[in-house]
Image (tube, coloured by chain):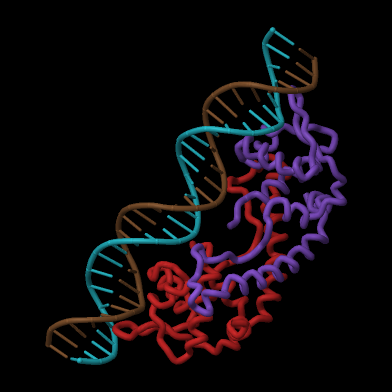
Chain colours: A red, B purple, C cyan, D brown
Amino acid sequence: MISGKFAITIHILTLLHKFPNDYLSSEYIAGSINLNPVLVRKEIANLKAHHIVESKEGKNGGTKLAVNAADLTLKQIFEMTFETIGLGFAKNQPNPDCPVGKNINQHLEMLYSEMNQNVSKQLEGISLEDFSNQF
Amino acid sequence: MISGKFAITIHILTLLHKFPNDYLSSEYIAGSINLNPVLVRKEIANLKAHHIVESKEGKNGGTKLAVNAADLTLKQIFEMTFETIGLGFAKNQPNPDCPVGKNINQHLEMLYSEMNQNVSKQLEGISLEDFSNQF
DNA sequence: CATACTGTAATAAAATATGTTACAAATTTA
DNA sequence: TAAATTTGTAACATATTTTATTACAGTATG
């Protein structure tokens, strides 16, 4: 898992949107993000799996957008990179013999679920085009 | 980005709320969370710094709530444990010679700031008492 | 004065994230 | 068709963050 996944992915997509007619290489993209090209290719692999971009191998190969930037929302990007938002759980299983320990994670999950709906609604209203056009 | 701080802190506070007349030891609390007592004491130190709990040293010592659970909101707990919500940033400074790299973090910050306002509003509506009374 | 706590520092271990190297396979272009 | 360039991916290395442990001085209780 990559913690900067969302930021990296949206950075990639913004670059692709800025150059709609080019296949951008992972090397070039990595130069903008200041990140190892292999990690860029890993994120691109994820985007490909979701059919958001397409790649061409070989000389002059690279990656370009495969969808309309106006139709791709930040919510979708969020869901492709994070499964969920939330404020975390304690690492170990709480004590099942304690009424609080027994139920805390379930209650946290409900809370986080509401947070997700909340944030999803917000991100749903912003397209890649909107985001990219800020630049 | 996400540690168990919030979950641990709200677990501690819920226990304290359930036993309003007792000083609970870090050992006892740790047993419910299934966490090392030293880490419990560290989170309690944070709560003390915010005057949410008070502790008593020595034999039969421990910690108890110092505020009314109805007045303490999850937003406050959120702010004491996370500074902010968000979807992260790429680790390295992006390329300042690229128009996208130069500005991406600023735009992400704006986006995350809106997310924070959004989530904060939600968490503001839930008190520790509300949360604890679910159990 | 023995016991049972907190407070805190120092250190260790575990988990996660990021970086690097290597190379096969694909495609272009000379 | 050969050289060059790029993706795709695996394997391994390093760095960073989080959690755990040990140790012990200080404090209140009975």
User: Which residue is at 45% across, 92% downward?
Assistant: A21
* Side of B57 where B3 appears, left or right: left
Q: Residue at x 63, y 84 (%)?
A: A130
Establish if A48 lies above or below A1.
Answer: below
**How many numbered markers are drawn?**
0
- Vertically, is C8 above or below D3? above
| Residue D20, position as x, y percentages in the image | 54, 38
Left or right, A14 with reference to B45:
left
Q: Position of residue A133 (x, y in %)?
A: 60, 85
Q: Quadrant of residue C21?
A: bottom left
Please say if B68 is above or below A111. above
Q: Position of residue A77 (x, y in %)?
A: 57, 75
Query: From this viewpoint, which residue is outermost toward the front?
Result: B97
Of residues B127 and A70, the one drawn nearer to the viewer in this rendering: A70
Q: Is residue A62 above or below residue C23?
A: below
- Classify residue A83 by image quadrant: bottom right
Of B121 and A80, the residue lying toward us: B121
Tell me: B16 left or right of A85. right
Q: Position of residue C5 (x, y in %)?
A: 70, 27
Left or right of A122? Residue A50 is left
Q: Quadrant of the N terminus of chain B?
A: bottom right
